[in-house]
C-alpha cells in the first residue's frame, strides 16, 4: 500500500503541519524523482477533491508554453494559482506542460513563500540537488583535488596554487618548481633536517600543542615523524593523503618559501609558533606551498575538529580544496594538492597507489618533514643557511 | 572604385578627390572630463551623469598616423563614436576641412566555417541576474530558470527539451548594482567595522545557484559591470575562491568579458554589455541591436575604449578587433530582448542577440544552434495583484 502511504504523508504535511508542499520539497523529503512527486501531488489533490472532506486545499500550477508576442514566439514559464490557471492556458498558443507546483492549506497571496520553501530544502540538500531531477549530466562530477591544479594551470589565471609541474612559466613557477624540484632538492634540505630529526619529534609535539592540538594531533604528528609508512597504511584517504602531503609539503614549501620574499618565511616561521589562527588570517599573502605547510599544521588540529565532518563530507572537502580563505576544510584537500607534485612522478592516482609510492620516497623525507615542521621553528635561526641551501636545491 | 586614390592625411591636396582611412575622434562638449571637473577657474560642479552625452555641436575629426583633419559633409556626426576606423571619400577644402561625400566601414569580417550540430542543441543566454539587490522579486524567476534547466520543472516533453541545452552562459551582472555601495568608504571605521560588504551575501547566493546549475549543465560565467572583478576591459574571470561550492565541478567555467568560445562547433562572441551601453551614451543610436550590428560592421567590439570606457592599454595589438565573423554575437544587460539574423556578402551568417537583464525582465534567451534561431523564455510567479 505504498500509494496510501505517500498520500497519508502528503496529507500530514499539508493539513497537520500546515506546510506548503511543493513538488521539489516533496521530492527531497520522500526521496523520489521530481516527476513522481508531481504525480503524487496530483493524485493527492484529485483524491481530496473527490472526498470532499471539507478541508480546503489550494493548489498552484506550473504552466509552460509559447505564445506569439510582437511577431515572434516567446516561451513562457509561469507559476499560477488555480483560479488563474485557465486564463493562463488560454493565453498561450501552445502549452508545453502543466503540472502541480504546490499544495497548501492557505491561500497564497504571492509566490514568495513558494520560493522560500524551495530555497530551504535546496539549501539543505545542496550537493544532491540533481539526484532527483530529470536531467543528469555526465560531466558534472566534483573534481578530485588532484585534478584541480591541472584545471588551474589550464585556466588563464593560474594563480599561485601549486600547479602541476607543467606550469613553470609565471610567478607560480616557484610553486611549480617546488613540487618537481622538491624531489631532487629534498636531498639537500634533508641533510640539515636530519640534524633536527631528533628535535623534530619533540618539536612536533610542541607545535601540536601550540596549535591547539587535540589528542589525535600529537599521535598523528609523532606518528608522522617516526613512521610515515605506518601512518599511510592506517589513514588511507584524507588522513593518509594529508599525512603524505604534509611530509611532502613540508619539504616542498621549504624551497619555495625561501625563494619567496623574506616576509613569507618569517611569517611562516612565526606561524607554527603562534597559533594557527594566524594562518587563517593571512591566507592571501601566502603562496600555496606556504599555506599548505601551515595548513598541514592546521590540518592537524582542524582535522580532529572536523574529523567527523571530514569523513562524511569528503566530497565537500574535495570541492573546497581550492578555497584558500576557508582553510578549515581545505587542509586535507589542500594537502591533496601536493600529491599532484609527486603525482607526476607516480602517476596521479587515488590514495592507494600514491601512498605506497610516497611511502618509499618519504622514508627519508618523513623525518625531514616532521623535522621540517620543527624546522620551521628553527628557520629563524638557520634561515640564512637554509636559504642558500635551498636556493641551490631549487636551482 | 578602383581609380580612387587612397591618400594619407599628410599627402592631401586641396580639391583632390581621394579616400582617406583613419580613426575617428569625436570632440564632444558634454563628455565628462576630469580636467573640467577639477578646473578651479570655471568653478564648475561635476557634471551629473547623463544618459546620453551627445550635443549638436559635436565635431568629427579623422586621425591617421600623423595628422588629423576635421570632417564635415555627408556624414552623420551623431551616430559615430570615437575610435571607429573607417574610410571617407571626398576632398579637402580650402579651409582645411575635409568634405565627405561617402564613407564606409570595414564591414563584416571574413566568415568562419560552419560546424554546427545537426540535431537541436540549445544554449541558454542569461544576463543581469542581479543577486543581492535586496528585493526578492526576481529570485523566484531565477529559481524557475534553474529548475527548467536542471530538468525539474515541466512535463516530460519540456524536460527532454531542456536536456538538449548544452551550455548556459551567464553574461555579466550576476550581482546587482546595490551591492556596489561604497558607503563603507565614507563612513567612520567604527560604524562599519562589523558590517560586511553586500556583495558577500550575494556571492554566496550566486554560489548556490551555480552549484545547482553546474550539477546538470556546463556553465560559463562572465563578469559584468557590477561583479567583483577588475573594472577595465577585458575583465578577468571571477576567482574560483569566491565560488567554493560550484567551482569543484568541472562544468563551471569562469571566463572573461568579452568572451569568445566554440560551443558545439558554433563560434560565440559576446560581452556583458558595457561596450554597447557606452556607445549608446555617446551616439544617437538608441537601439541596442542596431549598435551591436554596427560594431560588427565596424569590425571592432568596443571602439570607445579606452576613451570613455576603461580598458587595458594595449599598444602592440588590439584584441577587440574582429578578425573572424562569429556565428552568434551577443551582448548582455540590454534593456530588452532582440535578435536578428544577419547575412553577409561573403556568406557570413551571424545571429545578433541582445540579452535582457534578468532582474528586470525575467527573460532569458534560448539559442538553437542548429538553425541559429533564438527564442526568449520568460519566467514569472504570481503577485498580490494578478494582472494577466
Image: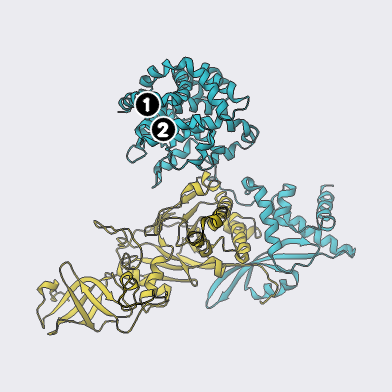
Chain colours: A cyan, B yellow
Q: Residue B231, located in which quarter of the rendered image?
A: bottom left
Q: How many marks?
A: 2
Pinpoint residue B279: horizontal percent, then vertical percent. 37, 72
Between A91 and B256, the one lying in front of the other is B256
Q: Residue at x 45, y 28 (%)?
A: A249
Between A158 and A258, the one lying in front of the other is A258
Secondary structure of the residue carrying tag 2 is helix
Which chain letter matches label 2? A
Q: How far, Cα to Cα, is label 2 from label 1?
A: 9 Å
Q: Residue B22, located in which quarter of the rendered image?
A: bottom left
The residue that mark 1 highlights is: A383
Q: Say whether mark 1 and mark 2 are on the same chain.
A: yes
B334 on left or right of B325:
right
Label 2 environment density (alpha carbons within 10 Å; few <14, some 14–19, many ≥20): some
Label 1 environment density (alpha carbons within 10 Å; few <14, some 14–19, many ≥20): many
Secondary structure of the residue carrying tag 1 is helix
Query: Farthest residue in the right direction?
Result: A53
Which comes sooner in the sequence, label 2 or label 1? 2
Pinpoint residue B243: horizontal percent, then vertical percent. 52, 49
Q: Mark yes or no: residue B135 visible.
A: yes
Q: Residue at x 53, y 57 (%)?
A: B199
Which chain letter matches label 1? A
| Tag shown at residue A98 | none
Pinpoint residue B19: horizontal percent, then vertical percent. 17, 75
The residue that mark 2 highlights is: A266
Cβ–Cβ under 8 Å for marks 2 and 1: yes
Say which quadrant the N terminus of chain B sits in: bottom left
Say which quadrant the C terminus of chain B sits in: bottom right
Between B338 and A97, the one lying in front of the other is B338
Pinpoint residue A225: horizontal percent, then vertical percent. 51, 19
Q: Mark yes or no: residue B345 visible.
A: no
Amino acid at each position: 500500500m505504498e500509494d496510501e502511504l505517500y498520500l497519508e504523508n502528503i496529507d500530514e504535511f499539508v493539513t497537520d503541519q500546515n506546510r506548503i508542499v511543493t513538488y521539489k520539497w516533496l521530492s527531497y523529503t520522500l526521496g523520489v524523482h521530481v516527476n513522481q512527486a508531481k504525480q503524487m501531488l496530483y493524485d493527492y489533490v484529485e483524491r481530496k477533491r473527490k472526498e470532499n472532506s471539507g478541508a480546503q486545499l489550494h493548489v498552484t500550477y506550473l504552466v509552460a508554453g509559447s505564445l506569439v508576442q510582437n511577431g515572434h514566439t516567446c516561451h513562457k514559464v509561469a507559476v499560477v494559482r488555480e483560479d488563474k490557471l485557465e486564463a493562463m492556458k488560454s493565453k498561450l498558443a501552445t502549452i508545453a506542460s502543466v503540472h502541480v507546483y504546490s499544495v497548501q492549506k492557505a491561500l497564497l497571496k504571492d509566490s514568495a513563500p513558494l520560493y522560500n520553501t524551495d530555497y530551504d530544502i535546496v539549501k539543505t540538500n545542496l550537493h544532491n540537488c540533481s539526484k532527483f531531477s530529470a536531467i543528469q549530466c555526465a560531466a558534472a562530477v566534483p573534481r578530485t583535488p588532484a585534478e584541480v591544479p591541472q584545471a588551474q594551470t589550464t585556466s588563464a589565471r593560474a594563480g599561485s596554487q601549486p600547479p602541476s609541474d607543467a606550469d613553470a612559466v609565471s610567478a607560480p613557477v616557484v610553486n611549480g618548481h617546488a613540487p618537481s624540484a622538491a624531489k631532487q632538492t629534498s636531498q639537500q634540505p634533508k641533510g640539515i633536517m636530519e640534524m633536527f630529526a631528533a628535535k623534530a619529534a619533540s618539536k612536533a609535539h610542541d607545535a601540536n600543542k601550540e596549535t591547539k592540538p587535540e589528542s589525535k594531533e600529537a599521535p598523528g604528528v609523532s606518528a608522522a615523524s617516526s613512521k610515515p609508512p605506518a601512518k599511510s597504511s592506517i589513514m588511507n584517504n584524507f588522513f593518509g593523503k594529508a599525512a603524505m602531503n604534509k611530509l611532502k609539503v613540508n619539504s616542498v614549501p621549504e624551497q619555495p618559501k625561501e625563494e619567496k620574499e623574506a616576509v613569507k618565511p618569517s611569517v611562516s616561521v612565526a606561524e607554527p609558533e603562534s597559533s594557527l589562527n594566524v594562518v587563517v588570517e593571512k591566507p592571501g599573502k601566502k603562496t600555496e606551498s606556504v599555506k599548505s605547510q601551515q595548513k598541514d599544521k592546521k590540518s592537524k588540529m582542524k582535522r580532529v575538529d572536523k574529523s567527523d565532518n571530514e569523513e562524511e563530507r569528503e566530497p565537500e572537502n574535495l570541492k573546497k580544496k581550492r578555497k584558500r580563505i576557508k582553510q578549515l576544510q581545505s587542509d586535507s584537500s589542500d594537502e591533496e594538492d601536493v600529491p599532484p607534485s609527486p603525482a607526476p612522478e607516480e602517476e596521479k592516482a587515488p590514495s592507494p597507489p600514491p601512498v605506497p609510492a610516497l611511502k618509499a620516497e618519504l622514508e627519508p623525507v618523513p623525518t625531514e618533514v616532521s623535522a621540517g615542521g620543527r624546522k620551521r621553528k628553527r628557520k629563524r635561526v638557520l634561515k640564512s643557511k637554509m636559504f642558500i641551501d635551498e636556493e641551490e636545491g631549487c636551482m | 572604385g578602383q581609380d580612387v586614390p587612397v591618400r594619407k592625411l599628410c599627402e592631401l591636396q586641396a580639391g583632390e578627390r581621394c579616400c582617406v582611412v583613419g580613426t575617428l575622434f569625436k570632440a564632444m562638449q558634454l563628455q565628462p572630463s576630469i580636467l573640467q571637473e577639477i578646473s578651479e577657474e570655471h568653478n564648475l560642479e561635476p557634471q551629473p551623469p547623463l544618459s546620453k552625452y551627445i550635443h549638436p555641436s559635436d565635431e568629427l575629426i579623422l586621425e591617421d598616423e600623423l595628422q588629423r583633419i576635421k570632417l564635415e559633409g555627408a556624414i552623420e556626426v551623431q551616430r559615430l563614436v570615437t575610435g571607429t576606423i573607417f574610410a571617407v571619400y571626398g576632398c579637402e577644402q580650402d579651409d582645411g576641412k575635409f568634405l565627405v561625400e561617402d564613407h564606409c566601414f570595414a564591414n563584416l569580417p571574413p566568415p568562419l566555417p560552419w560546424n554546427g550540430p545537426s540535431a537541436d542543441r540549445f544554449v541558454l543566454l542569461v544576463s543581469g541576474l542581479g543577486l543581492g539587490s535586496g528585493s526578492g522579486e526576481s529570485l523566484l524567476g531565477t529559481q524557475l530558470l534553474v529548475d527548467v534547466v536542471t530538468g525539474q520543472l515541466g512535463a516530460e516533453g519540456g524536460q527532454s527539451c531542456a536536456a538538449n541545452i548544452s551550455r548556459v552562459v551567464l553574461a555579466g551582472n550576476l550581482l546587482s548594482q546595490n551591492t556596489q555601495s561604497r558607503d563603507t568608504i565614507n563612513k567612520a571605521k567604527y560604524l562599519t567595522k562589523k558590517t560586511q560588504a553586500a556583495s558577500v551575501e550575494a556571492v554566496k547566493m550566486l554560489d548556490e545557484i551555480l552549484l545547482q546549475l553546474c550539477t546538470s549543465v556546463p556553465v560559463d560565467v562572465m563578469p559584468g559591470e557590477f561583479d567583483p572583478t577588475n573594472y577595465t576591459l577585458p575583465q578577468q574571470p571571477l576567482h574560483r575562491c569566491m565560488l567554493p561550492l560550484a567551482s569543484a565541478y568541472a562544468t563551471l567555467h569562469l571566463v572573461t568579458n568579452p568572451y569568445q568560445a566554440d560551443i558545439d562547433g558554433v563560434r560565440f562572441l559576446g560581452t556583458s554589455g558595457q561596450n554597447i551601453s557606452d556607445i549608446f551614451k555617446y551616439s544617437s543610436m538608441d537601439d541596442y541591436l542596431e549598435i551591436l550590428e554596427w560594431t560588427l560592421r565596424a569590425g571592432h567590439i568596443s571602439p570607445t575604449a579606452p576613451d570613455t570606457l576603461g580598458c587595458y592599454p594595449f599598444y602592440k595589438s588590439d584584441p577587440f578587433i574582429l578578425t573572424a565573423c562569429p556565428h552568434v554575437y551577443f551582448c548582455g544587460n540590454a534593456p530588452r530582448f532582440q535578435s536578428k539574423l544577419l547575412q553577409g556578402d561573403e556568406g557570413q551568417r551571424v545571429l545578433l542577440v541582445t540579452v535582457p537583464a534578468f532582474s528586470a525582465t525575467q527573460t532569458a534567451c534560448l539559442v538553437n544552434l542548429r538553425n541559429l534561431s533564438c527564442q526568449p523564455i520568460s519566467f514569472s510567479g504570481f503577485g498580490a495583484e494578478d494582472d494577466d
